[in-house]
């Protein structure tokens, strides 16, 4: 009897594709950790930061897959001011494992709302 090929639905991942026609492994895109979508990882990161800081979150600003999990950046209101353009915000980074559990977190920086940060675009 001929051997039946297994489909993706049966848990066989598709082959990794290289962006570089030469197939340089250093240039291959990072594969998404199994188990969580980027949206789900972002939601977990947001909740972890809100729980740990006890502060109001503005939203997720970055979700990046890593070999062993996810990096999630979350913007937090650290100090409310009147007018709101004077609010002090902070950017936190949460490191999650492939299941969405928190491994570590840190505050990357603090800044005034509306101060504009063009350096973030280059990262």
Image (cartoon, grey):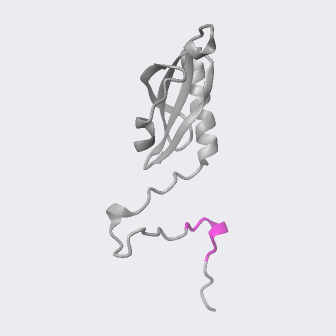
Q: Split into 4 quadrants, where in the image is the C terminus? A: top left
Most extreme residue toward the top is 82
Q: Is residue 16 left or right of residue 27?
A: right
Residue 57 belongs to magenta span: no
Residue 3 versus residue 119: which sits nearer the camera? 119
Name the residue located 59 percent from the left edge and 46 percent from the top edge: 38
Residue 8 belongs to magenta span: yes
The tally of labels here is 0
**Chain part drawn in magenta:** 6-13
Q: Residue 98 in the image: state x and y as whole percent.
A: 52, 44
Question: Which quadrant of the figure has residue 113?
Answer: top right
Report whether residue 123 is seen: no
Name the residue located 32 percent from the left edge and 61 percent from the top edge: 26
Most extreme residue toward the bottom is 1
Residue 89 versus residue 55: which sits nearer the camera? 89
Q: Residue 13 in the image: state x and y as whole percent.
A: 55, 66
Identify whether 67 is placed above or below 83: below
Magenta segment, prevailing SS (helix, strand or loop)? loop
Name the residue located 38 percent from the left edge and 75 percent from the top edge: 21
Most extreme residue toward the right is 9
Residue 31 versus residue 77: which sits nearer the camera? 77
Identify whether 76 is placed above or below 71: above
Q: Split into 4 quadrants, where in the image is the N terminus? A: bottom right
Q: In this view, does 85 lie to the left or right of 9?
A: left
Report whether residue 74 is seen: yes
Identify whether 121 is placed above or below 7: above
Q: Residue 25 in the image: state x and y as whole percent.
A: 34, 65
């Amino acid at each position: 009897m001929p051997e039946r090929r297994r489909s993706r639905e049966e848990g066989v991942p598709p082959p990794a594709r290289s962006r570089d026609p030469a197939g340089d492994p250093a240039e291959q895109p990072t594969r998404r950790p199994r188990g969580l979508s980027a949206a789900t990882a972002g939601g977990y990161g947001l909740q972890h930061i809100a729980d740990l800081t006890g502060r109001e979150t503005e939203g997720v600003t970055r979700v990046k897959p890593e070999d062993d999990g996810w990096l999630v950046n979350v913007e937090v209101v650290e100090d409310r001011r009147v007018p709101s353009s004077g609010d002090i915000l902070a950017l936190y980074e949460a490191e999650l494992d492939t299941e969405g559990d928190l491994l570590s977190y840190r505050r990357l920086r603090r800044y005034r709302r509306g101060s504009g940060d063009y350096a973030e675009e280059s990262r």
